[in-house]
Amino acid sequence: MKLKVGIFDSGIGGFTVLNSLLKTRTDVEVFYLADTKRIPFGNKNFKEIRLIAKEICTFFENKNLDALLIACNTTNACALDILENNLRVPCFDLINSVSEIVDKQLIGVLATQTTVRSSYYKNTISSKKENTRIFEQECPEFVSEIEKEKLNYKRINYLSDLYLRPLINENIEELILGCSHYPLIYDFLREKIDSNIKIIDPSISLIKKFNKCFTIPENDCYESLSYDNIKFFVTSENDLFSKKVKFWFEINKEIRLVNLGSNV
């Protein structure tokens, strides 16, 4: 029997969590929700994010989930308690997962405006690691650029320089990609900073925690990525999302259109 797993994000950022999951096991049925109508989450306020989180819970209520993978850092920072209290299934989040593996003192975080202003990354890491200094950088334009049907390499290159410069000036030793969209442009970011600076994709830490809780069956023989057991749901523009799925995964999948309720 397959594990029923929910993954949600505002758009394609959750693809990083989905891929990290599918690279480790095949015994899952995934319900992927992209709230494309309200993307980006990163410029919404605390109250709005918490309302969205409640509506996301309502969507997943009848899916009989075994676990929820929170693939949105902004919702993680503002509404983790809502997700945990309403769904009553194990919820695996990015920020708490990655905070357990940082091992340097000077840590940079690239994230959305709302995530940075919540101070959730800074507070979580500081509570688990003594003598750390965390430098956070808002990246207000990254998500909208990454969500385009085709990447504008010149623009991504410019923004990478712009957002990384303040962190490089602080002599950071590790860089956390504090938005699930950002690993999709890992190559741009990697070439901008010294090779000695470790770039951390929180989705990998999240999946390690998930796999520790839900043991991979001994007969689970991973050979290659398969998207057969993935169901995609969006709140707008399902045709456009279908093109994005084809661009990033090179597959054709049915994209189901759903209504979450409010117009936040």
Image (spheres, grey):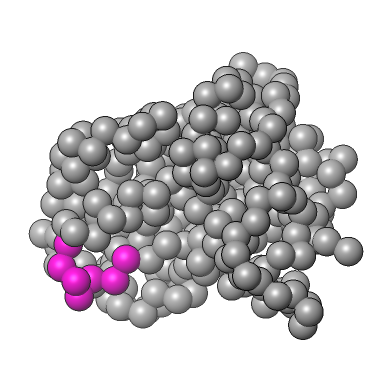
The residue drawn where x is 52% and y is 46% is: 249
Which residue is found at the position 43% from the left and 45% from the top?
Answer: 181
Q: Is residue 229 above or below residue 33?
A: below
Q: Position of residue 230 (x, y in %)?
A: 70, 47
- Say whether residue 245 is left or right of residue 223: left
- The quadrant holding residue 49 is top right
- The residue shown at (77%, 35%) is 59
Name, please, the residue furthest toward the left. 169
Residue 24 rendering spot, x and y as whole percentages? 61, 70
Residue 104, picture quadrant: bottom left
Is 248 contained in the magenta span?
Answer: no
**Res. 51 in view:** no
Residue at coordinates 62% horizontally, 70% vertically from top-left? 223
- Secondary structure mainly formed by the magenta segment: loop
- Viewer-nearest residue: 221 or 185: 221
Name the foreground residue: 242 vs 148: 242
Q: Residue 144 at what x, y percent from top left?
A: 37, 31
145 relative to 23, above or below: above
Q: Is residue 194 magenta?
A: yes
To which quarter of the image does residue 195 belong? bottom left
Outermost residue, top direction? 263
Is residue 204 visible in the rendered image? The answer is yes
Query: Where in the figure is residue 188, as x and y percent of width and height?
Result: 24, 51
Q: Quadrant of the N terminus?
A: bottom right
Q: Which residues are magenta?
A: 193-199
4 to 56, vertically: above or below:
below
